[in-house]
Amino acid sequence: MATLSAPARTEPAHAKTAAPKRGTDTPFKRRLPLLPALLFVVAVTQLPFLLTVFYSFQSWNLVRPGSRHFVGLRNYIDVFADSTFLGALLNTVVLTVVCVFFSLLLGLGLAILLDRKFLGRGVVRTLLITPFLILPAAGALLWKTTMFDPTYGLLHFVFGTDVDWLSEFPLAAVMAQVVWQWTPFMMLLILAGLQSQPKDVLEAAAVDGAGRWRTFTSITLPHLSRFLQLATLLGAIYIVNSFDAIFLMTQGGPGTASTNLPFYIYQRAFQGFDIGQSSAMGVIVVILTMIVATFALRLMFRTFSVQGGVK
């Protein structure tokens, strides 16, 4: 007995199209729009740094024509034997640590204040953010003339003393201006962390009878750890390069009391015209900054992995 079988279905020719291949040139095409930005970054950062490294191995002073010649590591040896450089390095560390600590502390307090609901919170938030929106040069001149002037300054009016703050306490005066400028930045980062807290956890802690201080130390502060680390890292990277306040307020003086590494490199390069040693100082500063930033980033990413459950 013959059996009937259904005729085989034939697909039209236009339906037999090959599936698009993935993974061949798609990633390159996706990254191609970023190529101009990458080339720009390389041109304005990496090429000048390589040129600085090249100059750091040469003895070259612009006021002595024909003095350019290769000296190897001699510039680096002279830099570490320079007492002014070591003093500027110490001032840089003190300036960075103190300013980051007080900016973070004040930013935490202001963020906790702004996290509460009260009348006029939007106006207060805008006023507190204002110092971060002012140009660093304008902020430095504002503090120099309005706050620290021994005759017409606000501190003279409040305390009734004729203390020349910029001459007697130059580094502390610069620190005050830098803290005033960077506290709003810390406040914004910490405020973002406070507003990202899960409300159900806070409500559960309140139901269990935990007080405000216990809730803050046991729940809020661990939640803010990643935001505090990020604020510390970014603040340190920016504050270690402080130049405007020192240049406009104290000129690194009196003597070298308020001279930090960026200002001392400026002095050696554009006032002493010593290209070789100033380039060596710049390379040393970049290397030290990279070491500190790498350590801080690893610590921060490790914290993110632990809190995110990634092993």
Image (cartoon, helix red, strand yellow):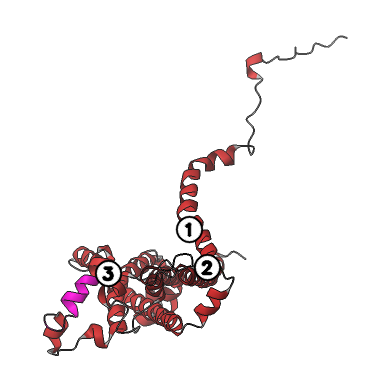
3 or 1: mark nearer the eye: 1
Q: Amino acid at mark 3?
A: Leu
Depth check: 70 or 76 in front? 70
Tell which tag, 1 or 2, sits nearer the viewer.
2
Tell me the element at label 3: helix
Q: Amino acid at mark 1?
A: Pro
User: Which badge, 3 or 1, comes first in the chain's sequence?
Assistant: 1
Is the Cβ of the residue at disc 1 closer than 8 Å to that at disc 2? no
Question: What are the residue bounds of the magenta stretch?
Answer: 140-151
Q: Nearer the viewer, mark 2 or mark 3?
A: 2
Rendered view: 240 above or below 254: above
Total numbered labels placed on residues in the image: 3
Q: Which label sits on residue 114? A: 3
The dominant secondary structure in magenta is helix
Q: Is residue 299 magenta?
A: no
Where residue 48 is drawn, which disc sits there? 1
Residue 64 on image: x %, y %: 43, 68
Residue at image position (64%, 28%) is 19
Q: Inspect the magenta stretch and tell me whether residue 142 lies in it.
A: yes
Q: Is residue 175 above or below residue 48?
A: below
Residue 59 percent coordinates (x, y): 51, 69
* For residue 117, side relative to residue 92 (left or right): left
Q: Looking at the rendering, in which quadrant would you find the C terminus?
A: bottom right
